[in-house]
């Protein structure tokens, strides 16, 4: 077996078991991918993928273990490559941050500006997606860390460090009646068409759960992954939005107004997520501390060590 075969396994799963999509992402041929999987299965002595009419439909029980091992192996190889760059002359290297639109657009710009001033020879790459896809990139070793709200599923091989909370507000066009009611309630909000985050985001479920607890069924007119898209439709008069307060900027949103709704909807916890059982490089520690000053190298190191002990005991 070899790393190429493990990479093929991971890419097939990432592309929903579609061989053609995986081959395209890998810049190779579909027959070539299929052949390498067959060779790996022959060497292991069991099937990795369930097949129906010669099509991959999912992972076998053994395939689940192969996929987990392949992710870890590829992550470690990527970590070695990053370490090689970090140890080179001149402090060169790469920092890959997986994050969401909200963090990339509204929170990170001054953080990254300061980081680049301190590390002018380090290349920073942002990979945007929903919280789950951001964590997937870290688990696969394709990003150094994730900065995102809690994902909708659990990632047992990641160490999650809470770094801040995001409060929620109602965003409406200037003059909208929801801005003027004496007491903002869930019932009042539910009277109006609503624009909010889509189902891939924990924020969507937090909002819906709050309405459900009051026996209310809001009219969701539009859901999107991008707060700027949500605000654009609010500005056009489609409805009001329930978004992170961080996304409102009075200078850039002159037609909109914000009203705090943190008493109605719980805050979202934003985590920095790292791969367990890996050495956290100095430039990553510096970036983490810039994002969340309370996450000092000592705090991060203790969290990583605790995760290692926990994994050893459970294993």
Image (tube, rainbow, N blue to C red):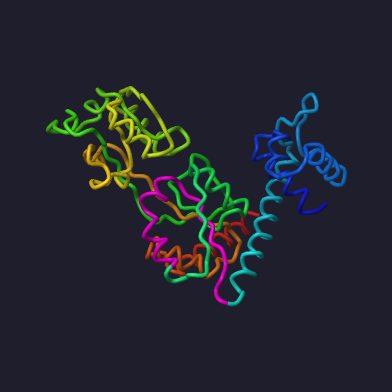
The percent coordinates of residue 277 (x first, y second) are 61, 61
The percent coordinates of residue 63 (x first, y second) are 74, 41
- At 60% from the left edge and 53% from the top edge, which residue is drawn? 142
Location of residue 73 with respect to 216 vertically, above or below: below
The percent coordinates of residue 248 (x first, y second) are 28, 44
Location of residue 220 with respect to 286 vertically, above or below: above
- Nearest the eye: 158 or 93: 93
Q: Check if residue 99 falls in the magenta segment.
A: yes
Query: Viewed as shown, does residue 61 lie left or right of 309?
Result: right
Task: Please tell me how many numbered marks the rendered image carries.
Answer: 0
Query: Viewed as shown, does residue 44 lie left or right of 184?
Result: right
Location of residue 22 with respect to 307 vertically, above or below: above
Residue that extends furthest to the bottom in the rendered view of this protein: 89
- At 81% from the left edge and 38% from the top edge, which residue is drawn? 34
Q: Say which quarter of the image contains residue 59.
A: top right
- Nearest the eye: 37 or 226: 226
Q: Give the range drawn in magenta.
A: 90-116
Q: In which quarter of the image is the C terminus?
A: bottom right
- At 56% from the left edge and 63% from the top edge, which residue is drawn? 94
Q: Say which quarter of the image contains residue 244.
A: top left
- Nearest the eye: 175 or 277: 175
- At 43% from the left edge and 46% from the top edge, which residue is drawn? 149
Q: Say which quarter of the image contains residue 238.
A: top left
Query: Viewed as shown, does residue 142 lie left or right of 177?
Result: right
The percent coordinates of residue 266 (x first, y second) are 32, 41
Q: Is the magenta stretch mostly helix, strand or loop?
A: helix
Query: Viewed as shown, does residue 39 lie left or right of 16?
Result: right
Q: Check if residue 290 falls in the magenta segment.
A: no
């Amino acid at each position: 077996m070899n790393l190429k075969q493990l990479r093929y396994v991971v890419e097939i799963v990432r592309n929903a078991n579609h061989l053609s999509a995986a081959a395209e992402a890998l810049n190779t041929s579909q027959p070539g991918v299929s052949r390498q999987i067959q060779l790996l299965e022959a060497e292991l002595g069991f099937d990795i993928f369930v097949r129906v009419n010669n099509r991959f439909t999912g992972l076998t029980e053994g395939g689940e273990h192969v996929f987990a091992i392949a992710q870890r192996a590829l992550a470690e190889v990527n970590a070695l490559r990053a370490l090689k760059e970090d140890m080179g002359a001149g402090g060169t290297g790469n920092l890959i941050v997986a994050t969401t639109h909200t963090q990339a657009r509204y929170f990170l710009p001054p953080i990254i500006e300061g980081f680049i001033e301190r590390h002018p020879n380090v290349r920073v790459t942002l990979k945007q997606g929903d919280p789950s896809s951001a964590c997937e990139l870290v688990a696969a070793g394709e990003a150094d860390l994730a900065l995102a709200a809690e994902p909708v599923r659990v990632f047992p091989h990641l160490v999650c460090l809470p770094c801040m909370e995001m409060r929620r507000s109602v965003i409406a066009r200037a003059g909208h009646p929801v801005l003027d009611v004496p007491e903002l309630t869930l019932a009042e909000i539910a009277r109006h068409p609503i624009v909010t985050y889509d189902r891939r985001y924990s924020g969507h479920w937090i909002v819906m759960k709050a309405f459900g607890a009051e026996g209310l069924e809001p009219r969701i007119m539009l859901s999107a992954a991008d707060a700027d898209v949500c605000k654009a439709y609010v500005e056009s008069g489609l409805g009001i939005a329930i978004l992170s307060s961080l996304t409102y900027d009075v200078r850039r949103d002159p037609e909109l107004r914000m009203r705090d709704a943190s008493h109605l909807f719980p805050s979202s916890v934003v985590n920095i997520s790292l791969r367990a059982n890996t050495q956290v490089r100095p430039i990553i520690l510096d970036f983490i501390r810039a994002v969340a000053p309370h996450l000092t190298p000592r705090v991060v190191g203790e969290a990583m060590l605790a995760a290692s002990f926990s994994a050893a005991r459970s294993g």
